[in-house]
Amino acid sequence: MGNRLPLIAGNWKMYKTGDEAVQSARRLKELAADAAGVEIMIAPTFTALAQVAAAIQSSNIALGAQNLHWETQGAFTGEISAPMLVNAGCRYVIIGHSERRQYFGETDQSVQRKIRAAVNAGLRPVMCIGETETEREAGKTFSVLDKQIQKGLEGFVFQDLKSLVLAYEPVWAIGTGKTATKEQAQEAHAYIRRQLAAIVDDGFARQVRILYGGSVKPSNVKELMAMPDVDGALVGGASLDPETFSQLVHYQG
Ligand code: 13P
């Protein structure tokens, strides 16, 4: 068992204008000020990043982005690079979220390039993986996770991946109210950790944080976090309201 600091992260997706995001961030800053033994991250939309960075300055909340482009700059209309995110105040970036894989053509190969870009810029990547309902029903959960890990982390060595965070988000549990049971989450997380030990190394697998995502809420966070391989949560819906998210970051009681 490694000594892994739990991370509770809020993915705000395409919700909240800059002003709304600042308001939520300010409230969260007050509510979460006393949260101990846990790291907190929020990932607002791009246009809110710089404003939110200012609002959470000198707090225990880190800023993350929801995506990035793999080049540092260039003629890529509509894209945002890792150095731009760093400059806006980000420490983390979510990569390969299932919504990006499903709707925006994200592939394991683009995930791999984006992780490289994040690492090069000193951003901590939060790499999302997870199976769809059809894949689970067909008994393909582990082979899907395996492929996403293998291809997404191809060519990396331990040294590159020190700041990597994994997020297991079963697609069927995202925004559906259907949470994976704590046993299902533990089983997948343990599998992911074993695979990471095999393809990167043992030490890495012991220290890497694996978050669970998919309908995490105040009523189920405690039992999920009690599982030995669950090191945090990546929260969508329940992260939007600061009071609710504050209950999640205070899951330890
Ligand atoms: P929900 O918490 O709304 O199910 O979303 C999970 C998610 O996609 C976090 O990235």
Image (cartoon, helix red, strand yellow):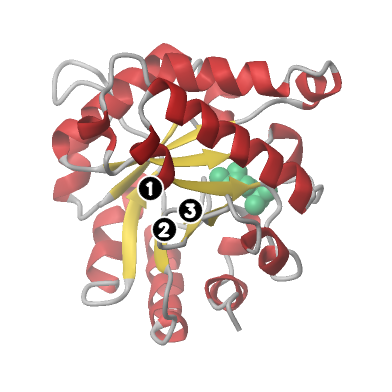
Q: Is residue 74 above or below residue 11?
A: above
Gap between marks 2 and 1, in whole Å?
Answer: 6 Å
Task: Report which quarter residue 129 is drawn in.
Answer: top right
Residue ID for mark 3: 1
Task: Report which quarter residue 5 is drawn in.
Answer: bottom left
| Ligand 1 neighbours mark 1 (CB distance < 8 Å) | no
* Residue in the image at 58% along x and 30% along y: 98
Q: Amino acid at mark 3?
A: Met
Q: Which SS class for mark 1?
A: helix
Q: Is residue 241 above or below residue 46?
A: below
* Residue in the image at 31% along x and 48% along y: 92
Q: Amino acid at mark 1?
A: Gln
Residue 169 is situated, as x and y percent measured from the top left of the image, at 62, 39
142 horizontally vs 122: left or right:
right
Foreground: disc 1 or disc 3: 3
Please tell me which residue lies in front, 88 or 184. 184
Residue ID for mark 2: 4
Q: Could one spot residue 212 in this view of the protein?
A: yes
Gap between marks 2 and 3, in whole Å?
Answer: 9 Å
Q: Which SS class for mark 2?
A: loop
Label annotation for residue 207: 1
129 horizontally vs 136: left or right:
left
**Whether label 2 touches label 1, CB < 8 Å:** yes
Q: Amino acid at mark 2?
A: Arg
On the rendered image, what quadrant is the C terminus found in?
Answer: bottom right
Please tell me which residue lies in front, 190 or 240. 190
161 horizontally vs 97: left or right:
left
Residue 50 is situated, as x and y percent measured from the top left of the image, at 24, 57
Say whether disc 1 or disc 3 marks the residue closer to the N-terminus: 3
Q: Which SS class for mark 3?
A: loop
Please tell me which residue lies in front, 230 or 205. 205
Q: Residues within 10 Å of mark 2 (few under 14, many from 20)?
A: some
